[in-house]
Amino acid sequence: MGDFFSDYDVGKFFDEMFSGPGAVRPHYGKLLDRFKEMERAEFDRKRDLAASTFLRQGITFTVYNDEQGTERIFPFDLIPRIIPAKEWDLIERGLVQRITALNLFLHDIYHSQNILRDRVIPKKIVWEATNFRPEFMHFDVPKNIYIHICGTDLVRDRDGNYLVLEDNARCPSGVSYVLENRQAMKRVFPNLFAKHRVRPVEDYSQELLNVLRYIAPNDNAEPTVVLLTPGTYNSAYFEHSFLARSMGIEIVEGRDLIAHDGKVCMRTTKGLSRVDVIYRRINDDFLDPKVFRKDSGLGVPGLVEAYRKGNVSLANSIGTGVADDKVVYHFVPKMIRYYLDQDPILPNVPTYLASVPEDLTYILENISELVVKAANESGGYGMLVGTQATKEELESFRERVRADPRNYIAQPVVPLSRAPAFCETSMQGRHLDLRPYILYGEKVKIIPGGLTRVALEDGSLVVNSSQGGGSKDTWVLDEEENGNRNA
Amino acid sequence: MLSRVADSLYWMSRYIERAENNARIAEVNLQLLLDLANQPQSDAQQQWNPIISSLEENELFASLYATLDGTAAIDFVGLQEENPNSISSCLTLARENARSTREQMSSEMWEQINRLYLFVQSEAGKELLRTSPYEFFRRIVAGSHLFQGITDATMTHGEGWDFIRIGKLLERADCTSRILDLKYHILLPSGERVGGNIDTIQWMAVLKSCSALEAYRKIYVDQVAPWKVAEFIITHAEFPRSIRFSVDSLDSALHRISGSDEAKYANDVERLSGRLRSDLDYVTISDVFEFGLHEYLGAIQKRLVEVGDGLHATYCESEAITD
């Protein structure tokens, strides 16, 4: 037999599958049984099948600055991450609470700014946030929803507690991998999958379409919804096309749209045709060269005017970036108390703000123990992991933080949980995170599970696909199946 | 349908058809060399020059290769990335266009384009072209046929499908005219007479490149004669690779998109295609030869370009508000 797990090293971290050497957690019991009876050759065949499926379907992402083969498949690990129903319930409640508070926060700061008046959040933190859009003060967004699609990154600490690492409230990506990974797992492990009561993810596209239709201007019951992409050269183009296809809507580029007389139309073979809702996968800055960046060739001149007139709806709304600013992040637990009068269900990772003098001193003195992040970067860029940095890197980051304290935060290095991943010849513990996708329309809906990203390099804590990360299918078990009742 | 999407579907289809036709031309030339193997050897330059000429790429070829021989010509037609019309370039462009219109086509269509592309890019594909070019070209032709079959069987026969058909038919009419014109560029070895043995073999090769030899045989029982080959390839109403058939079908597809009556025209592109269609319906082969076959085919190619431009102007540059 393949003997995949007999030498598995649980290490000093929280392990998703084992509570100690050889001690499998109940919800992983059936998986372990299946692997005990599997030959290595069978496993290799399954891996090849999965990889060739992704390649054949062209499920690839683009790697910039890489001459050879600019398209790669996102490495996929065959060991699913399994989440029991009770844990998921906690996550779900925590995320609903968080998205509710974030939306109330956005509405507040674009209207009366009570939270600033009451000094819960320092005024200048909001006003100095790069993605705060004062041009949209007192603008009412459709149905008062700002963040329609949110990807919130969760990690687990050494004790297995779920913590929020960051919110992605602009254009979170990755959900297509959730759906494709599930497809692949069903194909590769049909029997194993059938033995678990895994909650389905397949209705994501329909739920997303419902959200987009819900926000149509003037309660139009038959709105024309489109997805706006930067184009085929964007690293997430596959996802844009995938979502448009599964929702049955047009995928458009900026050049396909024309804003005229406060209305947005697309150029079709039968002339111009009105557009009501735009799911835009382009950041605010590039949306409209008349209002934001003048050099943007991706956007549509006049789009913002049409949006202001209420003739076209955007998801997400303009100006949500202030909510996923990493400094503002620090205040989310306070927002939850302020707007909802509740304790946060999912805590933040402790965060030091370089703009606070005591914190700054602490950061500069302890930088080699901390993770330092720029407030508005994503994708693993603009980030320093102090424990793994050289002296020069530490010094250069000290300089950057001193020069621009508003835009830096620091956090202790979270010893991220690990799960087994197949690396070269054996199962190895690898660090991972979880990005659930939250949809906010008539109600809040969360796709059960989300994208589990795994840092495939030994010891690495960076899970981003641009930095050598891979992914796993994420199985949220149904209520009925807690523990190994059926085992 | 979005104008950009219509345009991309049209070009995707054209590039696949172009890859197929280039494979046909190369394959038949290989065949021809075999057929003539026992004849006094003409030099390699003479054997391969017609192909490069019919692609109108003599200058580009000369800038890339020191000598014109079989290996160079096969590489040029098959894999040369500098050649915008090589099979490899055509399939890359077809796939790029397909990538930007994936939501319009069935998964099966996309997978077939992707598979064909990955085959040509793979080491195995390159190796096959080196060791067994005939086999390589057969795979391309079969791959293109499979794509067309999948398209007809899995895609809704709506506007997008019509744009795909138009791309295919326009490209096919153009390529067929170039294949026929190939014979113009092939020189007869000295001492051979027109209508002689070698001349006949060469005309048969032209028919084979259009998959037309068997169909031709059923109609013309006697010898293969130039004017009959030309008549068949230009004017046959039912043979699916003839120029007339391609233009007839193209014109019908255009009318399906606009919904207008085939006897009339609703826009500029229909006027251009309709006029070309009726010219091909009524032309006789003696008219063609009187005009000069090479010149006639050149004029057809020019008018096909006009139809392509008209299509773009009619469907991809509209600004009118239809609220």
Image: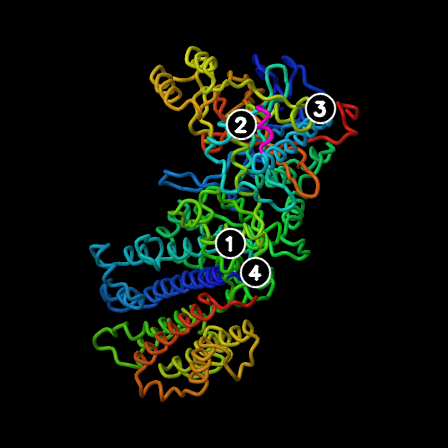
Provide residue A40's location: percent of width, then percent of height.
58, 28
Please tell me if label 1 and label 2 are on a single chain.
yes
- Compared to residue A63, the image places residue A124 above or below, namely above
Residue at 27% across, 72% down: B185
Q: Which mark is residue A27?
A: 3
Please tell me if label 4 and label 3 are on a single chain.
yes
Q: CA distance from mark 4 to mark 3?
A: 50 Å
Quadrant including the N terminus of chain B: bottom right
Residue beneath disc 4: A274
The disc, 2 or 3, on the residue closer to the chain's N-terminal end is 3
Q: CA distance from mark 1 to mark 2?
A: 33 Å
- Compared to residue A457, the image places residue B63 above or below, namely below
Residue type marked 4: Arg
From the image, state whether disc 2 or disc 3 is nearer to you: 2
Residue at 32% across, 72% down: B182
- Compared to residue A1, the image places residue A387 above or below, namely above
From the image, state whether disc 4 or disc 2 is nearer to you: 2
Pointer 3 chain: A
The magenta region covers A113-119
Q: Which mark is residue A372?
A: none
Q: Which mark is residue A328?
A: 2
Scheme of colours in the image: rainbow
Q: Which mark is residue A252?
A: 1
Q: CA distance from mark 1 to mark 3?
A: 43 Å
Pointer 1 chain: A
Left or right: where A197 falls relative to B300? right
